[in-house]
Amino acid sequence: MDAETVGDSVHSINMLTVIASESYKGFVSDLQSDIKTVLYDRPTKATAEYFTGKTIIIGEQQFVIDEVCAKEIYRYLIKNDYIDNEDKLTDEYRTDLANNCLAELPIDIRHMASGIHNLIQGIFDESILDDMIENGNRTKIPNELNDNFYKKEFQTLWSYINHKYAYTVEFDSNELIVEHISYDQIEGDYDSTIFTAEKNSQGFEKAFRAEKHIQDYVFTDGSADKSVERRFAQDLDAAKEVCVYAKLPKGFAIPTPVGNYSPDWAIAFNKGAVKHIYFIAETKGTMESLNLRPIEQAKISCAKKLFNEISTNEVKYHDVDSYQSLMNIMNSL
């Protein structure tokens, strides 16, 4: 059963418990193959062609999505990183959906929002099969919040950054978007459950076992030992100056004119080890802004604006490519 057939009750229906007498790995592989065969005709990509011609029913009204509307939906998904280069749904979409913080659709199609998102969720996602069936070679390890989250240092940091904000901006020209943006705190805070609501598609064997993180395992974007995020997490965990840190989930998002933006890390340092401030970091493989996409540059500029406004003395933000570059910036403040 899927959401297209049974709606919201899909999550309570699709619970599968299996006791397999044969090789469990072989059983899982065969079962996944069978499911894929049954669902072979399901659309797997969120293309403009997929949306074109679909009928949406809102109340007693029917709306047929034409080519112009379909292209607008497609651009919306790209802008918010909700689809990847192969037009398949990303973790960003699934996380925002789970946290009820999906980016708003363009104003002229916003009246069809519920129907459009039903269509998006009707796209068959092969990665869900890995969530439905536990791999026989993997031991499920709890990754709940540990005692580090409740340390006073992290609680102080969390109190600074967990508020939700809305922006106002003057669209005089493309160059003035960031310069004329301002943020205002709105009602509502991010609950700590955003750290545990996000599902990870990679196994725990690829995660980094941490001591100072607010969860026992850190899932970095690059699982290889030489990836920027993996090295950064290892350095944070080993640094005597660091008290506690968090890999921020995608659900923790800053709204910008070019889509939601999620910084990578929140770090609390030991008092006296360095200047006693808190740091929000974005880890990039290079410090050269020319190597970043224009949209990413704009999002990072908006993030800097927000953190400069909410606490110039306590919370700092910077994009870095290593722990050493972070310390260099800290020492220059």
Image: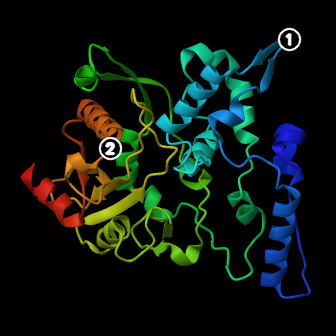
Which class describes the residues within 10 Å of circle 2: few (<14), some (14-19), or many (20+)? few
Sooner in the amino-acid sequence: mark 1 or mark 2 = 1
Q: Quadrant of residue 205?
A: bottom right
Residue pictured at 58% horizontal, 66% vertical: 143
Give yes or no for contact between labels 1 and 2 (Cβ–Cβ under 8 Å): no
- Residue 295 visible in rendering: yes
SS at mark 1? loop
* Residue 166 pos. (x, y %): 42, 24
Q: Which mark is residue 293?
A: 2
Residue pictured at 76% horizontal, 41% vertical: 122
Horizontally, residue 27 falls left or right of residue 120, namely right
* Residue 312 pos. (x, y %): 20, 36
**Name of the residue lying farthest toward the left:** 332
Q: Quadrant of residue 31?
A: bottom right
Q: Is residue 204 above or below residue 59?
A: below
* Residue receiving disc 1: 60
Q: Nearer the viewer, mark 1 or mark 2?
A: 2
Circle 1: residue type: Glu
Circle 2: residue type: Arg
Give how far apart the Cα atoms at labels 1 and 2 are. 43 Å
